[in-house]
């Protein structure tokens, strides 16, 4: 998966990257509704996924304002569906709430990953982002196994520990700085130190957010598409929140 990611970033075009991300978003949205809204099936499920896709579809143009317009168009379309199907939808408020949440939580957040790809040095920043998230996960796993006693959020994710979180923070920052040293002049080391720390904390929050959804719905994994690793949503949960954070750090000139 890491090799395919690098090939896509450095040999593929931005439009190909967009197409792959849209495909991932379709699968992630289907996993989300399968977990949270099991009675949503058939044509209405397909229509709902399409409506939720508007933000990430709008990222094709590489512009944040068009992505925001996609959010509004999707919201208006969802309102139209709810009003038209008021008498046939089993729980209108549930349908409306889950649809809007899916659009923002999955589609809008993934749109920001595409927006990063369109930035100057976009492939480098996405490589750095995935390396920080993956390095943090690895550091958290080994630190948690070796020193983990105190639980971080036991009611949401019993396996996560405070020691694991600290280990993930150290490992993620170390990997970020290592990549920066390997490519001198690309990014300021001091600003990267603080940005990487923020991204790691947000990544942990992203992981816990999906764990919270799964625990609320009494499911172990979001899907089975990746044997032994659950669903795609299980793999991208950290990126969903870290992608927008990195995009705005870059857009506001806080990381350069």
Image (cartoon, rainbow, N blue to C red):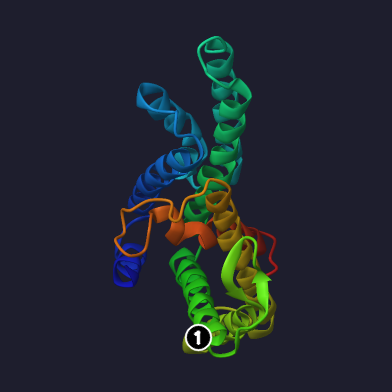
Is 169 on the left-hand or right-hand side of 232?
right
Is 33 on the left-hand or right-hand side of 155?
left
Badge 1 element: helix
The residue positioned 43% from the left and 39% from the top of the image is 34
> Residue 166, located in which quarter of the rendered image?
bottom right
Residue 170 placement (x, y as % from top left): 61, 86
In this rendering, does residue 188 appear at all? yes
The residue positioned 61% from the left and 38% from the top of the image is 68
In this rendering, does residue 198 appear at all? no
Residue 141 placement (x, y as % from top left): 50, 80
Is 213 on the left-hand or right-hand side of 12?
right
Quarter of the image with the N terminus is: bottom left
Count of numbered circles on the image: 1
> Residue 76, located in which quarter of the rendered image?
top right
Residue 97 placement (x, y as % from top left): 62, 32
The residue positioned 47% from the left and 43% from the top of the image is 35
Is 224 on the left-hand or right-hand side of 113?
left
Q: Nearer the viewer, residue 83 or 124?
A: 83
Q: Which residue does the numbered mark 1 point to in the structure image?
A: 142
Residue 231 vertical position relative to residue 6 in the rendered view, above or below: above
The residue positioned 56% from the left and 62% from the top of the image is 207
């Amino acid at each position: 998966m890491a090799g395919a990611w690098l090939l896509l970033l450095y040999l593929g075009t931005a439009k190909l990257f967009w197409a792959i991300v849209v495909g991932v978003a379709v699968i992630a949205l289907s996993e989300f509704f399968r977990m949270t809204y099991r009675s949503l099936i058939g044509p209405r499920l397909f229509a709902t996924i399409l409506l939720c896709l508007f933000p990430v579809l709008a990222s094709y143009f590489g512009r944040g304002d068009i992505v925001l317009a996609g959010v509004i168009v999707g919201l208006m379309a969802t309102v139209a569906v709810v009003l038209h199907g008021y008498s046939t939808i089993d729980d209108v408020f549930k349908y409306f709430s889950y649809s809007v949440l899916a659009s923002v939580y999955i589609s809008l957040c993934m749109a920001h990953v595409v927006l990063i790809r369109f930035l100057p040095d976009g492939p480098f920043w996405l490589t750095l982002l995935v390396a920080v998230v993956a390095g943090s996960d690895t550091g958290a796993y080994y630190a948690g196994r070796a020193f983990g006693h105190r639980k971080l959020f036991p009611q949401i994710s019993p396996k996560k520990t405070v020691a694991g979180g600290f280990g993930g923070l150290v490992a993620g920052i170390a990997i970020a700085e290592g990549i920066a040293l390997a490519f001198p002049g690309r990014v300021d080391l001091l600003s990267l130190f603080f940005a990487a720390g923020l991204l790691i904390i947000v990544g942990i929050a992203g992981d816990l957010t999906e764990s919270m959804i799964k625990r609320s719905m009494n499911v172990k994994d979001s899907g089975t598409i990746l044997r032994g690793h659950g669903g795609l949503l299980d793999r991208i949960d950290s990126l969903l929140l870290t992608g927008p954070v990195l995009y705005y750090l870059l857009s506001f000139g806080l990381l350069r």
